[in-house]
Amino acid sequence: MFGTPTVNGLGLPGPAFDATDKQLSETMETMWTQFAKTGNPNPPGTNAWPAYTVAGDTFIIFGDTLSTGTGFAPRSSIFSTKPWGGNGSGPFAS
């Protein structure tokens, strides 16, 4: 997906990719392309990435294999009420 790995974009050799990394890269590339073309990241005939619903709260996990999880942002998350905890901290604090 990102071509030849480099260190800080300097063209220095980065970590080697193995077959699993290459497959993950191709899967992500396919899903991004499908999403851009159709609004649905799944290739035809698959449902690896289920549509999001509040009730299901399902997300995809890209790893050595694809899997799904639930509860990515629990209700107690700082993002469920006020950004950055509402205390004036964070990257946009003045």
Image (cartoon, rainbow, N blue to C red):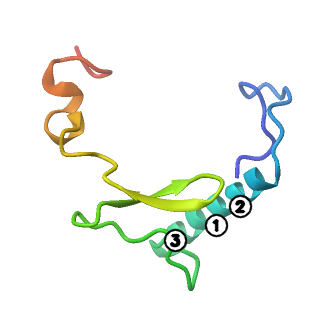
The residue tagged 2 is 26
Crowding at dot 3, Cα within 10 Å, few <14 / some 14-19 / many 20+, comes out as some
Q: Determine the secondary structure under disc 2.
A: helix
- Are the two marked residues, 2 and 3, in contact with CB atoms closer than 8 angstroms? no
In depth, the one of 15 and 65 nearer the eye is 65
- Are the two marked residues, 1 and 2, in contact with CB atoms closer than 8 angstroms? yes
Q: Position of residue 7 (x, y in %)?
A: 76, 26
* 75 in relation to 44, above or below: above
Q: Position of residue 38 (x, y in %)?
A: 49, 76
Tell me the quarter of the picture where residue 94 sits: top left
The residue tagged 3 is 48
Q: Determine the secondary structure under disc 3.
A: loop
Q: Earlier in the sequence, mark 3 or mark 1?
A: 1
Tell me the quarter of the picture where residue 62 sits: bottom right
Q: In screen coordinates, is 7 left or right of 63? A: right
* 46 in relation to 70, above or below: below
Q: CA distance from mark 1 to mark 2?
A: 6 Å
Q: CA distance from mark 3 to mark 1?
A: 12 Å
Residue drawn at x 70%, y 52% is 1
Q: Determine the secondary structure under disc 1.
A: helix
Crowding at dot 2, Cα within 10 Å, few <14 / some 14-19 / many 20+, comes out as some
The nearer-to-camera label among 2 and 3 is: 3
Q: Amino acid at mark 2?
A: Glu
Residue drawn at x 51%, y 55% is 61
Q: CA distance from mark 2 to mark 3?
A: 14 Å
Q: Most extreme residue toward the top, as rendered?
A: 94
Q: Which mark is on residue 30?
A: 1
Q: Amino acid at mark 3?
A: Ala
